[in-house]
Image: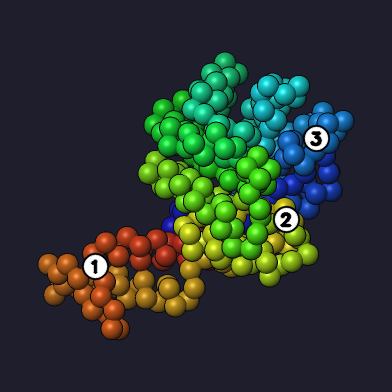
């Protein structure tokens, strides 16, 4: 059985909405981002902080990974958010506007000063032009264990706002930034999640964008509505045919007569030994999904 951490569907839930926080306990999401930032109006920040931290401490979310997105430290709510989030002890804290390694170094200092539990990871929102230009150095911050960096989350709406790029079908204006960020993440062993699909009424559009992100190599997609869970869970999963072929590749290379062969022909296709790790990833992915039950 695989212990792979699935992040196919990562759903934002507004921290100011108590009903939403409760409903999240029943949704087929791999991960939940309980949001104190963009989804919360300024006059509701304090209430949202209290509700989110109480919800995390209260539990009841099962195997779902729980992340708290805090406001940036330089905002009026940032310091209180970070302190409260650390006390609540989610799986991770999502930091907005990470535009340089210095931001992560500062957060590391805060975590140490507040004696944050070692299990709390840090996720970074990549949502500014400066972040794209500094992405390799930001990713390298993972090498310093103090930063606790494990995941990049693309903020495509903010990138569009700051660059004037259009959010058009196919996202051609953003593809270079997306792939550059993905390459930096993979080079340092980070998870990387795609940005949100804004039109909650267009489930087919969401599905197409999930499939694009999966084809590009992303681990999953951030979502803003429960109707988007099924497209994400389905698209970021290996198909039956992919799993069947993966098992054939693994079995073929495990045969004694193929022990010294670098490449094997299977059903008309050539497979090299490098394909074994890709095949095992597909099988492990399927096992992890089966263990979740959705």
Residue that label 2 marks: 198
Q: Position of residue 270 (x, y in %)?
A: 25, 75
Where 206 falls versus 71 (above or below)? below
Q: Secondary structure at mark 3?
A: helix
- The mark nearer the N terminus, 1 or 2, is 2
Residue that label 1 marks: 272
Which residue is drawn at the image coordinates 74% and 39% (left, top)?
A: 38
Mark in the foreground, 3 or 2: 2
Where 257 falls versus 11 (above or below)? below
How many numbered marks does the figure carry?
3
Where 29 falls versus 123 (above or below)? below
Which residue is drawn at the image coordinates 63% and 49% (left, top)?
A: 165
Q: Nearer the viewer, residue 271 or 135?
A: 135
* Quadrant assignment, res 43: top right
How packed mark 2 is, by other alpha carbons closer than 10 Å (few <14, some 14-19, many 20 or more), is some
Q: Is residue 49 left or right of residue 176?
A: right
Q: Secondary structure at mark 2?
A: loop
Q: Nearer the viewer, residue 233 or 188?
A: 188
Q: Quarter of the image containing the C terminus?
A: bottom right
How packed mark 1 is, by other alpha carbons closer than 10 Å (few <14, some 14-19, many 20 or more), is few
Residue at the front extreme? 164
- The mark nearer the N terminus, 3 or 1, is 3
Q: Position of residue 276 (x, y in %)?
A: 29, 64
Residue that label 3 marks: 48
């Amino acid at each position: 059985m695989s212990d792979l951490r699935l992040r196919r569907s990562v759903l934002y839930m507004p921290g100011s909405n108590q009903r939403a926080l409760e409903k999240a306990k029943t949704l087929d999401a791999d991960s939940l981002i309980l949001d104190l930032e963009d989804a919360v109006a300024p006059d509701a920040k304090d209430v949202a902080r209290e509700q989110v931290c109480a919800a995390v401490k209260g539990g009841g979310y099962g195997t779902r990974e729980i992340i708290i997105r805090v406001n940036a430290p330089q905002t009026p709510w940032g310091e209180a958010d970070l302190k409260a989030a650390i006390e609540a002890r989610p799986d991770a804290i999502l930091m907005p506007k990470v535009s340089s390694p210095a931001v992560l170094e500062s957060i590391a200092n805060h975590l140490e000063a507040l004696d944050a539990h070692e299990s709390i990871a840090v996720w970074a929102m990549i949502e500014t032009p400066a972040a794209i230009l500094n992405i390799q150095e930001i990713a390298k911050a993972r090498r310093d264990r103090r930063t606790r960096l494990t995941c990049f989350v693309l903020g495509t709406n903010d990138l569009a706002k700051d660059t004037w790029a259009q959010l058009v079908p196919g996202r051609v204006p953003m593809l270079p930034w997306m792939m550059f960020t993905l390459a930096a993440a993979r080079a340092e062993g980070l998870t990387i999640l795609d940005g949100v699909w804004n039109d909650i009424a267009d489930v087919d559009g969401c599905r197409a964008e999930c499939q694009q992100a999966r084809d590009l190599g992303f681990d999953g997609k951030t979502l803003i509505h429960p109707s988007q869970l099924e497209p994400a869970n389905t698209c970021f999963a290996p198909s039956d045919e992919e799993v069947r072929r993966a098992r054939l590749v693994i079995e073929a290379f495990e045969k004694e007569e193929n022990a010294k062969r670098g490449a094997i022909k299977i059903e008309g296709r050539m497979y090299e030994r490098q394909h074994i790790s890709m095949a095992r990833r597909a099988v492990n992915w399927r096992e992890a999904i089966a263990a979740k039950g959705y």
